[in-house]
Amino acid sequence: MEVTTRAAVSAILASRVEASLSLGRTPLGAVHAGAEICWAISGIPIASFNAVMRLRIGPDPDGQIDAIQEIFAERSMPFVWWVRQEDSEDGLDTKLRSHGLDYYGEESIGMAIALESQPETRVGKPISVERIVERSYVRLWFATLLESFGATADEQTAELATTVFTYLATNLLSGWHLYLASLNDRPVGTCALHLGSTAGLYSVGTVPIARRQGVGTVLTRRALADARSAGHIVASLTASGLGERLYRAHGFEEYRRLREFVWRLSS
């Protein structure tokens, strides 16, 4: 089976919107999914967990952007504004920059795969992967995810993230599956799978000391297998430039690029 460009782009954009909205549908979050604008606040004060996904530009785009910033500012939440190519052509990039959103120059690579086509892969060391739901393991999952990106969080942020992801992991209607990989009984990698109208992979990370040992391969393979078992025929993700090679080895192909504009509270 091959994925058509149209189906792949649709899957990439649909999963990004659905996963973000699901992150906001917890007791700590808030969402808006209208025809003009779509945004989600997770309640976790880290930009990558809060998002604006689309904006139908009206006669007063500056006023629209101001209104969105006020919503996030009232909750003290930084966020990422995902910009599609067609948004850039409408001048949204320039508008966002004028409102203090930062773009760091690297596009996120939208990739997709037909789940029947994923190749068999082997790894050299015994790496275990577990789907997690218990709060203590969710907290460990979050700490491992941050470590994989060279980040840390204060106690309040860690507690908020643990609460949000525990709610999602234990709520069958959320569509979220969380995976924690261990090597020699040490947590070394994370992955999240969101199942909505399509399947999407998120939060794939490996701590520095365990890289190049197949951790990302095992995590990705497990998530794709679960997506296929759930009846999905296409899976998507957005990759960094560094992650692109790993995903191409699994059979993912590039179909779309997105820009991430980041807004943070003024210090």
Image: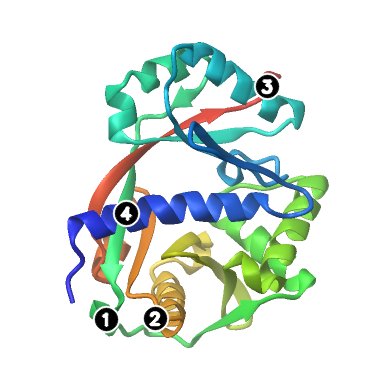
Q: Position of residue 67 (x, y in %)?
A: 62, 20
**Who's the residue at 38% across and 58% down the image?**
237
Q: How far apart are the two marked residues, 4 and 3, measured between alpha carbons?
A: 30 Å
Q: Secondary structure at mark 4?
A: helix
Q: Secondary structure at mark 3?
A: helix
Q: Which residue is mark 1?
A: 116
Q: Quadrant of the N terminus?
A: bottom left
The answer to whether the residue labelled 3 contacts the one labelled 2, judged by CB atoms less than 8 Å apart, is: no
Q: Is residue 232 something one can see in this rendering?
A: yes
Disc nearest the viewer among 4 and 3: 4
Q: How far apart are the two marked residues, 3 and 2, measured between alpha carbons?
A: 41 Å
The answer to whether the residue labelled 1 contacts the one labelled 2, judged by CB atoms less than 8 Å apart, is: yes
* Render colour scheme: rainbow
Q: How far apart are the two marked residues, 3 and 1, measured between alpha carbons?
A: 45 Å
Of the residues shown, which amino acid type is indicated by label 4? Ser
Q: Position of residue 59 (x, y in %)?
A: 44, 12
**Who's the residue at 69% across and 61% down the image?**
165
Of the residues shown, which amino acid type is indicated by label 1? Glu
Q: Which mark is residue 70?
A: 3
Q: Nearer the viewer, residue 18 or 153?
A: 18
Q: Nearer the viewer, residue 102 or 7?
A: 7
Of the residues shown, which amino acid type is indicated by label 2? Arg
Q: Which residue is mark 4?
A: 10
Of the residues shown, which amino acid type is indicated by label 3? Glu
Q: Secondary structure at mark 1?
A: helix
Q: Secondary structure at mark 2?
A: helix
Quadrant in which residue 94 is drawn: top left
Q: Which mark is residue 228?
A: 2
The answer to whether residue 1 is above or below residue 58 is below
